[in-house]
Image (tube, coloured by chain):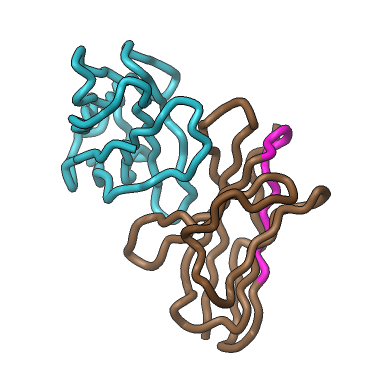
Chain colours: A cyan, B brown
Amino acid sequence: DAKTTQPTSMDCAEGRAANLPCNHSTISGNEYVYWYRQIHSQGPQYIIHGLKNNETNEMASLIITEDRKSSTLILPHATLRDTAVYYCIVRALYNTDKLIFGTGTRLQVFP
Amino acid sequence: NAGVMQNPRHLVRRRGQEARLRCSPMKGHSHVYWYRQLPEEGLKFMVYLQKENIIDESGMPKERFSAEFPKEGPSILRIQQVVRGDSAAYFCASSPPSEDTQYFGPGTRLTVL
């Protein structure tokens, strides 16, 4: 699976959009971009994943650049409960193998 | 559909005792994964199981650790003769056979005294 690079930490004001970037310049054509988050002391929570088209669900939006070398997870209206470590993971299609977690981005939402 | 269930949520053991951690996957999920998170560290893969089979145990310590996922019942992660360094949060995840998204349980926090 391709390697990802994320900023160590970010801040966001409550109610504003949180934009979390991820670089995956070595991504292959059959690899998806997955996002998980881990709120303090809890199990990781699946957020969203995508291949090349932008994706949106009830939690977030995922914007993948045309060359697929980077992506951005968008939380449109961040709340204090969105404070967590966010992980960007690249995995091959239909890969049931292990998830490899990097260090992620620690997002702090402040009032 | 209930999520992934893990029990106990907290487990305290003395050095040398055995720890048994249980994971009940989501209904319809036949793939189970165990991950460990040491204090102030990231999540590390331990083992991947399907019903009655270990698919990948490349992240399991070679000694004292074992895992199973029997035909009936939960998956069990077993740690024999625990040491203080085994203190960590152990997370289980499951996925259905046709999907590669893993869904995580709340974890078991093991403390070794």
Whole-percent x, y for residue B9 in the image: 61, 61
Q: Residue at x 51, y 83 (%)?
A: B83
Residue A76, compared with residue B34, is above or below; it is: above
Q: Is residue A4 magenta?
A: no
Whole-percent x, y for residue A105 in the image: 24, 44
Q: Quadrant of the N terminus of chain B?
A: top right
Q: Residue at x 25, y 18 (%)?
A: A64
Considering every residue shown, the one lying at the far right of the view is B72
Apparent side of residue A2 relative to residue A25 in the rendered image (left or right): right
Residue A43, compared with residue A59, is above or below; it is: below
Q: Residue at x 40, y 25 (%)?
A: A49
Task: Place residue B47 in its image quadrant.
Answer: bottom right
Whole-percent x, y for residue A88 in the image: 31, 36
Q: Is residue A81 visible?
A: yes
Residue B38, compared with residue A80, is above or below; it is: below
Q: Which residues are magenta?
A: B20-30
Q: Nearer the viewer, residue B110 or B33?
A: B33
